[in-house]
Image (cartoon, helix red, strand yellow):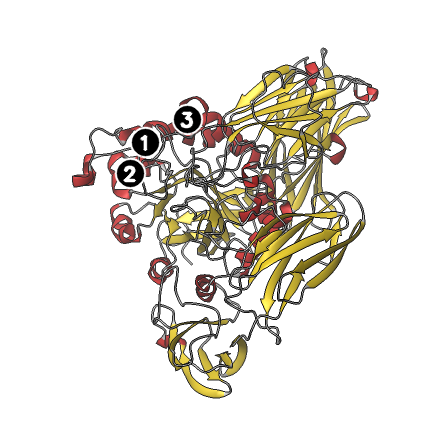
Amino acid sequence: MKQPRRAAWVFAATLFFLAGMASADVVDFDFDWRFSRGDFATAMMPAFDDSAWQRVDVPHDWSAEGPFLAEYGSGNGYAPGGIGWYRKHFTFDAADRGKRVVIEFDGVYHNSEVWINGHFVGRRPCGYSSFYYDLTRHVRFGQRENVVAVRVDHMKFADSRWYTGSGIYRHVRLHVTDKLHVGLWGVYVTTPEVKNDSATIRIETVVRNDHGEARTFSLESSVLAPDAKVVAALTLSGTLDANAEQTLVPQIRMADPRLWSTESPHLYTLRSVLKAGDEIVQEVATPFGIRTIAFDPDKGFFLNGRAMKLKGVCLHHDAGCLGAAVPDKVLERRLRLMKDLGANAIRTSHNPPAPELLDLCDRLGLLVKNEMFDEFTPPKNKWVEGWNAGQPSKFGYGEVFEQWSVRDMEDLVRRDRNHPCIIMWSIGNEIDYPNDPFSHPVLGNNYRPEHPPAENLVKHAKPLIEAVKRWDDTRPVTAALASITMSNAVGLAQLLDVVGYNYQEQHYEADHKAYPNRFIFGSENGDSYGAWAAVHDNDYVAGQFLWTGIDYLGEARRWPNRANGAGLLDMCGFRKPIGWFRQSLWSDEPMVYLCASDRGARRGRGMGGAEHWNWPDDARVTVSGYTNCDEVSLTLNGETLGTKQLSEAREGVLTWEVPFKAGVLRAVGRNAGRDVCEFVLRTAGSAARIVLSPDVTHLSADGKDVCHVEFEVVDEQGVCVPDAGHEITFNVNGPARIIGIENGDLNSLDDPKDNVHGAYRGRGLVILQAAREAGRVRLTARAEGLAGDDMEIEAGE
């Protein structure tokens, strides 16, 4: 095999949930907040009366609670914005006096301001950036109460091209440590040399002394294998002056490393023990992975020296009925569904993700393109009356870009640089979109000289690239470019380590010849067969990222359309025909799928038709089959309709013209003459009953765990009725609550937080969240004219 020309980027990873801190140092700060919409002049003061405010736990998204109205912006899914306040009351033990106290927010959308006991400690305009503040000077110890107050300003609700949410929509933690401590985000692990029989681990640790006098310390670093055995260790000692910090950079060599990969995502743990004399003052646990990455201009992407295509999907951060406040288990289900259909990579469109999403990608073996910005300055168009309809607003991050972009970029890299899943940093999405806002004469008749010059893109990009390299030089910098012609003309593409092409497959070949040392990949692509063929058939194209993996709120059309249907899955997580088609192209597991249409074969997002076998008696139906098997045999009620070879597929699709007869339509996939898989469509009768199907049998009584309950309206034989839209009432008894109900209908006006919701195409999803007490949880489903269903699940340890 030809060796890649470019040196490999190699690194290792830290998981979020401890931010490198042992559990004794970290307080979960998610529970028991008080919240109110509206503005209050003195709500930051400890004595302010918040007794009538709503009790909430975070993550919390008030936009998801509605009301959704036509007067709000279509870009944000017609969701409300406004101003909201959060307050949390808490105390410290007297024994904690003298400790350092830091509060960390994973994300607050947006324009947040934070006070502790009436003292202002900071503001953060970007709603996707994680940030932290030192509260030490102002906290009280013993029986005296402390109050953290957070003001969130989302008055300019039409400020995004997609749904954002509003509020403290991600986790919050309190870090309580000795004043001799490891800095937050202060551990950075890389592996500068990886061989088959050994690896060198470079450990960069920031140790800080906030005491008023010098302190002597030692730092013990141990590497634990996946089985928890220590495989390497060393100890360093030093002395720190008062209010000073030191960066230690030792290296450890270990034998026989187990590499992190998409198939076997092995994670090691760096255990750092900080001591003052014989006293342990802090323990830091840093999970990490050992792996190499490389890009080659002729051969594409390599993981651990093996060429592989990036089979990526773009994901926005909402989860349908939940809005932007997404529990960890919901994220996990979404990622597992992506991996099930053959995806091996995620693009965080178009903003930093929740840290736990990266933890999950580390564990599941999903590669990540971590993205920061959707616009530079000035802001892009934000559609209000519907996508590309009416007059857009011009609000957005671009208003604060010049002041905050470098800080936000640096903090993203510092927070996330230890994750083995991350293979690229993206400084922007379609920042070069023609005339939105930048323009250039190379656009010809589309040139708009009154718009900002495209040369400004280079001016804005350079500091961002420098910011990335300042904190992590082990991964390439990229951007998802919408106009490669304009970006080439002004030199933006030439600044990037790896160049992303959005919907520009037609330029791959010419640019590969014109820029022979350029690394090319599809950073955003349609789901057509041709877009994949451009990757599959050309070694030099590293891969593609489909728009999108899952339907998402916002970027909507005219009211009452609330969401965008570009996904391979709907907002319930139910796979669409286009999702099955993608599995046939990407997955190695044998599969076959059928869908049907009485309007002929269709391709693209509506391809194939419907996943049912209910048609008029005289209909002639086009049956589409997607498979990765050698051949597929089709039968109707046991009668053979023919066998087709995969080589007969047109743009990846096999088709049969079938006169409709009620019954059972069955496809069998064969490899080497052996049956390996099948798919069945059955004609449904009249709706008879509701069926509830939970995805777990036990809930942790931690106030966070969730159970996804799929519901179906079925006939007497248990077949889903495809046109059933019954209004169903759900009730819960026991220590859990319904946090959202979704049916996947992009035009549904049902309240996602109400317990009454309509089925769509015969099905939907209820999401239950556990309380913080044990007990038996019972969910009931009732609808007029249908037999109901009940389910029970235990909540406990």
Give the Cα separation between the discs numbered 2 and 1.
8 Å
Residue 593 point in image, percent of width and height = 48, 71
Amino acid at circle 2: Ser
Question: Which comes sooner in the sequence, label 2 or label 1?
Answer: 1
Q: Which residue is mark 3?
A: 401
Residue at figure coordinates x 70%, y 16% from the top left: 47
Q: Amino acid at mark 1?
A: Leu
Residue 243 is left or right of residue 525, and the answer is right
Mark 3 secondary-structure assignment: helix
The secondary structure type at the circle numbered 2 is: helix
Q: Is residue 685 visible?
A: yes
Q: Residue 23: x and y, percent?
A: 74, 35
The residue that disc 1 covers is: 457
For mark 2, does the 10 Å Cα neighbourhood hold few (<14), some (14 to 19), or many (20 or more) residues?
many
Residue, far left: 445
Residue at label 2?
487
Of 554 and 2, nearer the camera is 554
Q: Nearer the viewer, mark 3 or mark 2?
A: 3
Which of marks 1 and 3 precedes in the sequence?
A: 3
